[in-house]
Structures are given as structure tokens and as C-alpha cells.
Image (spheres, coloured by chain):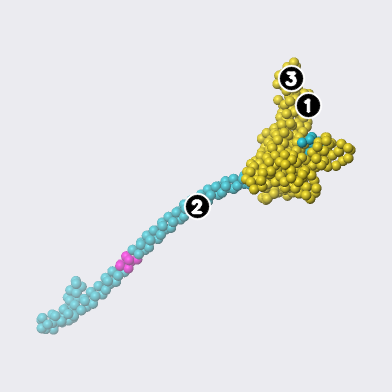
Amino acid sequence: MASENPTASEYIKHHLQNLTFGQHPDGSWGIAETSKQASDMGFWAIHLDTMGFSIGLGILFLWLFRIAAKKASVATPTGLQNFVELMVEFVDNSVKESFHGKSKVIAPLALTIFVWIFLMNLMDLVPVDFIPRIAHDIFGLEYFKIVPTTDINATLGLSLSVFFLIIFYSIKMKGIGGFAKELTLQPFNTPIMIPFNFVLEMVGLLAKPVSLALRLFGNLYAGELIFILIAILPWGVQWALSVPWAIFHILVITLQAFIFMMLTIVYLSMAHEEH
Amino acid sequence: MNLNLTLIGQAISFAIFVWFCMKFVWPPVIAALEERSKKIADGLEAANRASRDLELAQEQAAQILRESKDNAAEIIEQANKRANQMIDEAKEQVIADGKRLREAAQAEIEQDVMRAKEALRAQVSVLAFAGAEKILGATIDEKAHSEIVEQLAKEL
């Protein structure tokens, strides 16, 4: 911890700082000890906690689903296979409802997004001090943030990947010319309005990844912040607030994962379709 | 809240996860699901077919039952007819037998009557002679009058 008896604001700030690894301004590599050091590292630094947890959860997801996929049989499914089939069917239906093109990537992409984001969001329900305390006392790590989706880098990393897929599919389906036409000849189909159209469409295009990333980040960050605020209350009353909030948050984390998945499908199906 | 390499790291791990999911998770699960749904569809169709077959079989069974009922009724009717016939035959037989027996008895009776008459006739002449003897108090020439008596007896 930053100090033995942190003030409320110190405590909150402490909880919102990622474990950052990067190059110090003096040229040496290492883990940032303070948030100033972390921000001084600039772009060429990496959040070890975000990466670690997101990759760990991603591997957990793929491992679980791979086990079920290997055993997938036509006979009566049980336990894990049931669950996996439920998820796959749910995602498959969502994709079929909104996406009318043919693509082998969209459905697995949507499944990965949904389950992975859900698992990352789920970390929000772990009591806020639980894992950071272990990380601090056992591994001596100053900062530790276990919810990857409260890190803007994680959500932006996902949404930018989706953004590149949107551009990729737009060009693949409509050609560069078609994509350019879509950006310049809408909504006013006259050559004079091309600059105006372009600005408008560009904003619309760029708003997609930004809104995707910020929606997920904002929801989870706010949720996490409220858990932290609850955690600085006297310990005897914490449960009265954290339990209802956690129950409500179960809805939020599922909903946010679902929204991210649905919007990804919708954006990609828009990229597939001619206007 | 700094933008840094984590962004790219996330994008890369995301790409890898999606690729893995696409290659090793999605196809087998979807294949199993599709196969199962096909199997269920087949099963439903088979059930439909089976119920149709059942209906058909029931109809057939009902028809067979009906036919056999008809047959049975016919057989019973025939049997009844036959029984009636037999009864009639038996009755006729009995009637004929009775008639025959009665006739035989009658013949016997007649024969007996005749025999008795004969015996009577034989006795009558003796009685007549004895009576006449007593009445006349004299012996009658049996030989001379027996012809008359026998004549008389014949008239009886």
C-alpha cells in the first residue's frame, strides 16, 4: 500500500492504478512504483495485471470450451457440454438474427467477445481488496487491478480490432471504390457535398470503436469505483451496500458483454451490406 | 489510465483467441449441434411415421376384427340353422318311429284280437253245445249239428 493508513482519496487512487511495466525516464526497465512513474513511461509500457488477467481468462475460456468441443457428441450432453452448447447456440442465434452475410469468423468472434468480456467483467465481483492484498503481501506488487475491462487499453484493444475488421470487410465486400463511395457520397449524393459527407461519415465510422470501448470501460470503471467507495466504509456496514450492488452488477457485466457482442455483429453486418 | 502497449497486447491476444476459437472450439460444437438437431428431426419424423403406421395398423386390426365378427356371426347362424335342421330331422325321425311303433302295436293288438276271436270261436261252439244240451235235455248229435254251430261261429 502507498502508506500504512491511506486517506480515502489515496486509497481510491491506489486501487485505480495498474501494475505497469516499462522503461523509466532514466533508461532503466522496471515496474512503476508510483502512478507518476507509470505515466512517465509513456506509450511503451505494459499493464502486467491487465495482460495477465485477460490472457489468463481468455485461456480459461478457450480451455473450458475446448474440453467441451473435444467431447462434443450427439448423445445426451451433460454438464459442461450443456453449458458450452447453450452459449454457442445463443451466440449463433444472435449472429443469425443480425448478420445475413456468410462469414466463418463472425460467429466465433462473437462467442469469444461475449465469453471473454463476461469473464473479465466477472472479476469485478471479486472483493476489491482481495487479490491486490495477496499480490501486495505475497508477491510485493504495489499496484494490482484485477478487472481488465476497467483498463481503457483492454477495451480499446478489443474495439480497435473490431474496427479493423469493419474496414477489412467493407473493403472486401464493396471494394476500395465502393468503400470510398460509401464514405463520400452519403447522405448527400452530389459531388459538391463530398467533403461534408466525408467528415460526417468519418465521425460515424470512428465513433463505432470509440463508443464500443468507452461504453464497456465506463460501465465497468464506474462499477469498480463504487465497489471501492463501498470498501472505504466501516467494515460492519459494507455488506449492506456491496451485496445489492454486486447482485445488480451481475446484470451489468452480462449486459455489457452482450452489448459489445451485439454491436460488433451489427457493425460487421453493416460493413457487409450495400447501402 | 494511460494508453500504452497494453492496447496492442490486448489486440494481439484477442486475435489469437478468436483464431483459436474459430479453429478448435466453434466447428466441433456447431457440428455436434447440427448433427443432433438433424437426429432430433429424424427422430420426430420417425415418430410421425410410426404413429401413422400405428393408425394404419389399428385400422387394419379393426377391419380384421369386423370381418371376423361377421364370419363368426355367419358361422353361428349356420350352426343354428344346422341345429334347427337336426332338431327337425330328429323330430321327423321320432314322429316316424312313433308312427311305426304305433302301427306295430296296433298290428299286434289286432293280431291278438284275432287270436282271441279264434279262441273264442273255438270255445263258443263247445259252450253252445253245452248250453243247448242243457236246454234241450237231450244229447244232440254233435256231428250233425256242429256244422250249423260252426257256421254260427263264423258269423261272430
User: How far is mark 3 from mark 1, CA to CA?
Assistant: 22 Å
At x 30%, y 70%, the residue is B105
Q: Position of residue A272 (x, y in %)?
A: 73, 30
Residue holding disc 1: A175
Residue occupying image coordinates x 21% and y 76%: B121
Q: Classify mark 1: helix, strand or loop.
A: helix
The one of A165 and A159 positioned closer to us in this rendering: A159
In magenta stretch: residue A256: no
User: Residue B139 bears which disc, if any?
Assistant: none
Q: Which residues are magenta?
A: B97-103
The image quadrant of residue B22 is top right
Chain letter for mark 3: A
The picture places residue A267, in percent across and down from the top left corner, at 71, 31
Secondary structure of the residue carrying tag 3 is helix
Which label belongs to residue B65? 2
Q: Is residue A35 above or below residue B63?
A: above
Crowding at mark 2 (Cα within 10 Å: few <14, some 14-19, many 20+): few
**Chain A tint in image:** yellow
Q: Are marks 1 and 2 on the same chain?
A: no
In the rendering, at what x and y percent does residue B145 appear?
A: 16, 78
